[in-house]
Amino acid sequence: MAEEARELAQRRVSRRRFMIMGINVAGAGTALLIAAPIVGSVLSPVFAKRKTPWVMVADVSRVPIGVPTAYVVNLPINEGWSVPPVPRTVYVVKLNLNGSVEMLTLSNVCTHMQCDVHWDIGLQEFLCPCHGGLYSIDGTNIGGPPPWPLFRYEHKLVDSTLYVRNVLYEP
Amino acid sequence: MNPFLLGASAPVLSKIPISTGVATALVALLMLTHIQFAAFQQGGYLILAVSDFMGWKRKDERHNRFAHGLLICLGATFAFGSALAIFAVMILFLGLWSVFWDTIFRVLFWPMFVEAISFVGEIICLYTLYSQWQRLGGVRGLRVGLELLLFVNAQIQMFCIDVMASYMLTPRPSSDLALDIFNPTMIPLEIHRFVGNIAFAGAMIALVGGVRILWSKGSTSRAYADWMGHYGLVWAIGFTIAQPLVGWEYAKEIQLHAYASWYSMMLGGLSVAFLFQVFLLGAIFTVGIYYLWRRVRAGGVRAPALAVCTGISLAAWLLISTPSSLAWSYEDVFAANANVPIWQGGLLIPWGEMIPFKLVALIAFTGVAIVAITVYLKHLSRGHLTWGSAGRGQAVALIVVGVAVSLIMALMGYIREDSRSPFLITDQMLINQQQNFTPPSSPGPDLNGPGSGVGVVLPFGPPLP
Amino acid sequence: MKEASTAPQRSRLAATLTRPVAGLLATTYRWVDERLGVSDLTHQLLYEAVPRRGAWAYSLGSATLIIIVLQIVTGMFLLWTYVPSTTEAWESLNYIEHHDEFAAIVRGMHLWGAYVLFVVIGLHMIRTFVSGSYKKPRELNWIVGVVLFLLVLGLGITGAMLPWDQAAYWTATVVTHVVDYIPFLGNWVQEILRGGPQMGPETLTRFFAIHIWLLPALLVPLIGLHLVLLRRHGEHGSWVNYEGVEVESEQHRAERMAHAESPYPALPSDPGYAVPVDLDQFFPSQVFKDAVLSFGLVILIFVMAVVVGAPLERAANPAALNYVPTPEWFFLPLDQILVQFPQAWMIPVGVFVIPGIGTTLLMLVPFLDRTPDREPWRRPEVMAPALFAVLFLIFEALLAVNRLFNL
Ligand code: HEM
Ligand code: HEM
Ligand code: FES
């Protein structure tokens, strides 16, 4: 009698345990099923593939040596849905290095916090208005907070016409 | 160019048989003395108001006595200090520097006007307090209010005179008064002096306290002197803590907007003076924290945290005292090929050029002083301090801090005025008051390699590799 | 004579006319009350004891609450026009500014509400800090408060990105690039926040969702928790309400505890402070002060919204070369820290380590200061560093203004 009762009690307890376990499993499953797609969607930009077509800038044969010249290029932003291309500035810099002319296509995005830098004629340097970052004419960071030199756009020249695409590389 | 000034552009000094050098020395002596008095007024009013308030609200006899003593002292120094100022304005500025005075008055008429008016306010409040001290004791709120009014009034004065001082260093060529007033170094200078004057007044009180400890005979007067020294020192150290940060910002604005002056102060001829300045700051912090530690010990309480603070501060002080002798100016650093980042064996860190230890030490002083003051106040609030037990060592420490603060004030004024050389107003007027001149050449050697020229700006030191 | 006789008559007439209506109302109310328990609830909410002295300072919490409600309501109605899209956000607000005066006021109130909120929440924080209200048993209330403060900062900065004008665009750029300096994960986090490596259409929609859903969904329940905790332990108030408790006799203290009104006494850990010496009723004494302060602030917000309004700069243009980006004023100290920590490895120190240490210390305040003392001058171990911290923030903001003004 007593044994039976104990067994019964045990069975009850295990049934109770079973139900609690069931609640936990169902709860965890529900949370997982809701969370998985959400986390995926939040993370999706990390895995998205992007096309970066070439965009024509201008004929750069007249750009003078030693004077950074700004061109505004409408770069397609291949993120999310289609929006109109976004204007960005490309600084075309021609430098005379030991007789041969080298052409740089500098992005004007400050490497500190990504504000727009501009060529300051008085300073003869690129100046960032946000925190006073400074870059020399070839984009080397020479003062203020910026940690790296200005990045450069991938570019190609067809005759004297410059094309760039929305891919930046460190010099 | 103002047509009126054209005729006056020849140096006026030539009409008075005194050389520019002597005139400069005279004005320096007078103004540096005047600054000491003025700074004591500026900070003293706040300490006065706070003390009187404490005496009132917490019924503290020491504060009552101290407030009255301080008021009398402020009255006397006001009389003397303003006599100096009037002398300076009348004889030196109007007589010897009339073109300068005329120019600055045109640009900054309103600030100067307000400044002049505010003296009336100061005289009224101060005299009322001076003559009616006992009677005003019956309406204590009014008395504290008057004292606060004095402080506010003094702040207005300081604002006006800071406009002039900062304008001389970094004028903005404009016709807009707001731009003239809030020129690039105005706010940093204002904060720097606001904090500095209170610290200075505290240090002077500490100095007097220290002397009185040494001289005192009876135990009551000794206890009072002891308390007074402690009270002044807490103000002095507490407010000096802000100075390294604000001073750094101040220097940075000078660098951006008056590069030549900055070069001379930090890297050029005046960098020796500036190193001595940091050395003095080290003295203030180290000796001050040493005092805090010993003062708690004198009460029979162990204070290991304060001992550690003293040690760190001392180490930082030694750090700046030794290597600074290796390189007196950036030219030496350059000559020794040490103008590369410290991780390449050079002397440069991203925060500034030349002596990196200077900045490291300043950061250390700031951090340690905050901890030390906090710990000290904690001991104070727990009743661990008994007045009258301070020994000779602590009295001497108080005096050292007072003298160091006084020296640093004079040195700072000297550096600021001298860094503008050869200008009286940067880029606008030479010291001999000449206004049409060819700009002098760039300061120092061209150290920054290709791509740099006159007035090259390196806000935070050279690039990293 | 004549006057005197007609006056009561008229009121009797009014009573006869209104009696059926009043009766109906009363019956309805009773019906609802039996089912909902409204009057019980009202009674519970309103009739409680609060400390008497320093009560104006305790109005800051309610003022914060009221302004947050104002933010939520104005925000909801901004959504009637605002379009969260990089191509149309600016257009829709520009339309408001030029063609819809009332919506422009709503927008102005949302902006000035945010500005006033930062001042008020800051003062609330300072006042609870100075009065030592975070001490046992109210530690969690303080911690919840710090989280609330961070959420409100987050709402402020994400809101500032929404107009997608120049100011908004560059704020968003800088804020989303700060995370790039997180060691190892930075790049990912930046892409997640921006919806890609560069600023794009998804940047705005993501921050829009954060501003109007994610952060409010966290904020509102936490405010609830803050208030529940407040009610559980009672308003602590300022030390002036406890004057003399250290020298009080055992017997007197026991008497005070025995006669404490709800919700006092708080946890009996430091008995002197379990019940304020001098009590008042929450309703109407405290509510009156709360109402006056909140009303004053709402008037201020309204007037600023009408007179100054919310600015809208030119539409975002990533290629503009002569624009000086300026952060919202409540982020000026952080912007100045960006200047002060230059170049590679120091940037993360400036943007994460320093603010991180600051926030952690703020959270830990209740555990750093555990003495029973409530008077500020008896707690220099927290008051002195806090004073330095506040001065530091003010100086940093002033210096940032100076830097940007003279650029
Ligand atoms: C969303 C923002 C907040 C709201 C709506 C809010 C609301 C309130 C209200 C209504 C009170 C009671 C009245 C008063 O004492 O003022 C209160 C008390 C308190 N709040 Fe907040 N608060 C907020 C943020 C904060 C923050 C940022 C902190 C601190 C970091 C904080 C800490 C406290 C503490 C410690 C108390 C208890 C005060 C006492 O008992 O004396 N709260 N809060
Ligand atoms: C504590 C709460 C909140 C704060 C501090 C806050 C702050 C801000 C700020 C500073 C702006 C920028 C205004 C401007 O620059 O023009 C903004 C915009 C906006 N907020 Fe909020 N907000 C809060 C709550 C909400 C809520 C709950 C909603 C929605 C239900 C909302 C909806 C919006 C919308 C639609 C805008 C864009 C319109 C505009 O910029 O004028 N806000 N918010
Ligand atoms: S964003 Fe260019 S310096 Fe900070």
Image (cartoon, rainbow, N blue to C red):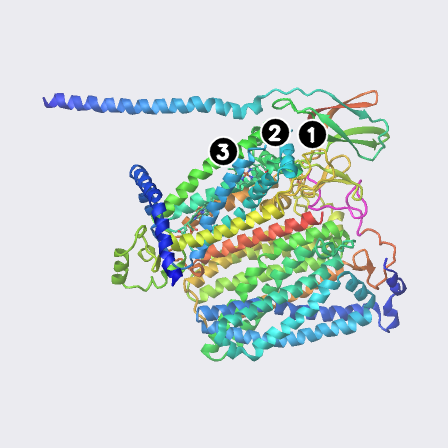
Mark in the foreground, 3 or 2? 2
At a point 57% along the width and 32% down the height, the residue shown is C186
In magenta stretch: residue B135: no
Q: Relative to C233, is C31 above or below? A: above
Q: Which residue is mark 1?
A: A170
Find numbered disc 3 in the image and state the secondary structure of the residue it sits on: helix
Residue B163 x/y as whole percent: 71, 60
At a point 64% along the width and 67% down the height, the residue shown is B39
Q: Chain of mark 1?
A: A
At a point 66% along the width and 55% down the height, the residue shown is B188
Q: Main secondary structure of the magenta part?
A: loop
Residue A41 x/y as whole percent: 52, 23
Residue B408 x/y as whole percent: 65, 63
Which one is in front, C143 or B24?
C143
At a point 61% along the width and 19% down the height, the residue shown is A49
Q: Are marks 1 and 2 on the same chain?
A: no
Q: Relative to C121, is C97 above or below? A: above
Q: Which residues are magenta?
A: B443-465
Regarding ligand 3, which quadrant of the image does it lie in?
top right
Residue B321 left/right relative to B298: right
Measure the alpha-carbon separation of dots 1 and 3: 36 Å
Q: Which residue is mark 3?
A: C214
Mark in the foreground, 1 or 2? 2
State which tag comes first along the sequence, 3 or 2.
2
Q: Which residue is mark 2?
A: C85
Residue B457 left/right relative to C370: right
